Amino acid sequence: DIQMTQSPSSLSASVGDRVTITCRTSQTIGPYLNWYQLKPGKAPNLLIYTASSLQSGVPSRFSGSGSGTDFTLTISSLQPEDFATYYCQQSYSNPITFGQGTRLEI
Amino acid sequence: QVQLQESGPGLLKPSETLSLTCSVSGSSFRSHYWNWIRQPPGKGLEWIGYIYYSGSSNYNPSLKSRVTMSVDTSRNQFSLKLSSVTAADTAVYYCARDEGSGTYLFDNWGQGTLVTVSS
């Protein structure tokens, strides 16, 4: 299985801050890395797919980059609704695996 | 608008079989793979597997011996059965749509349902 390592596991930030979350995979996966946002009691939301493509309807302050084994999710200017938990996921090989999550707190 | 909704018992005893159903609306049922994903309390997400409208499926090897998925195309529903549950199976269970057929890109999810295993 491909192991996913996210960092940091939690992050405190303020509205307007720029934040970056990192995801590292145990083997190369090309661009096949996706990012999701989870909030309690809500359906998870796909933000970024294939490393850098912005999902339709997702604000442009979200961006992704990387390839191979190292990837980042950046939020350029935090908004109140962005405080949530973020997960990376590899879609390169079975079984599909996720990172352990980054909790973004105020 | 695509909507997925999980349903099923929220409390099970050890050794029982977990049974959940996901009802899909607003989407072509035959154009996508349909997935189950779970999140134990305080832990990360775990992909359980997918099923296609034809009945073909693929399960996570870590759960394969206990998982069965099925599909009811007449109702646009798919289901998960997980046998011999233990406390380790306590989790929020999500159903999710694969954007295509095997892209493993989950573009629509249900809100999740908490299943607790306790004696």
Image (cartoon, rainbow, N blue to C red):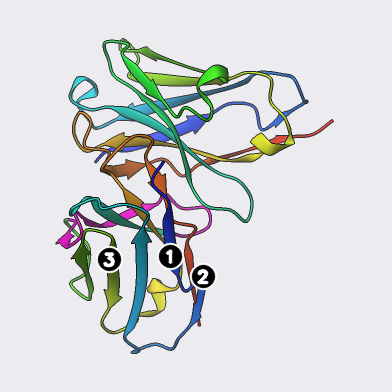
Q: Pointer 3: residues within 10 angstroms few (<14), some, or many (20+)?
A: many
Residue extending furthest toward the front: A27
> Which residue is label 3 attached to?
A71
Label 1 crowding class (10 Å Cα cut-off): few <14, some 14-19, many 20+? many
Residue B108 image offset from top left, x and y in percent: 31, 42
Magenta residues, start to end: A38-55
**Mark 1 sits on what residue?**
A6
Q: Residue A29 at x, y = what percent?
A: 24, 50
- Residue type of the residue flagged with mark 3: Phe
* Position above or below: B55 against B99: above
Placement of the C terminus of chain B among the 4 image quadrants: top right
Q: On what subunit does the disc labeled 2 rest? A: A
A103 or A89, which is in the foreground?
A: A89
Instruction: Give the quarter of the image for residue A77.
Output: bottom left
Q: Is residue B60 left or right of residue B55?
A: right
Point 28% across, 60% down: residue: A69
- Please give the chain letter of the residue carrying mark 3: A
Precedes in sequence: disc 3 or disc 1: 1
Q: Are marks 2 and 1 in contact (CB under 8 Å)?
A: yes
Question: Which amino acid type is shown beneath numbered disc 2?
Answer: Ser
Question: Tag 1's secondary structure?
Answer: strand
Q: Nearer the viewer, residue A29 or A55?
A: A29
Image mark for residue A9: 2
Does the magenta-highlighted stretch encompass residue A92? Answer: no
Residues behind callouts 3 and 1 on a single chain: yes
Q: Residue at x 51, y 70 (%)?
A: A9
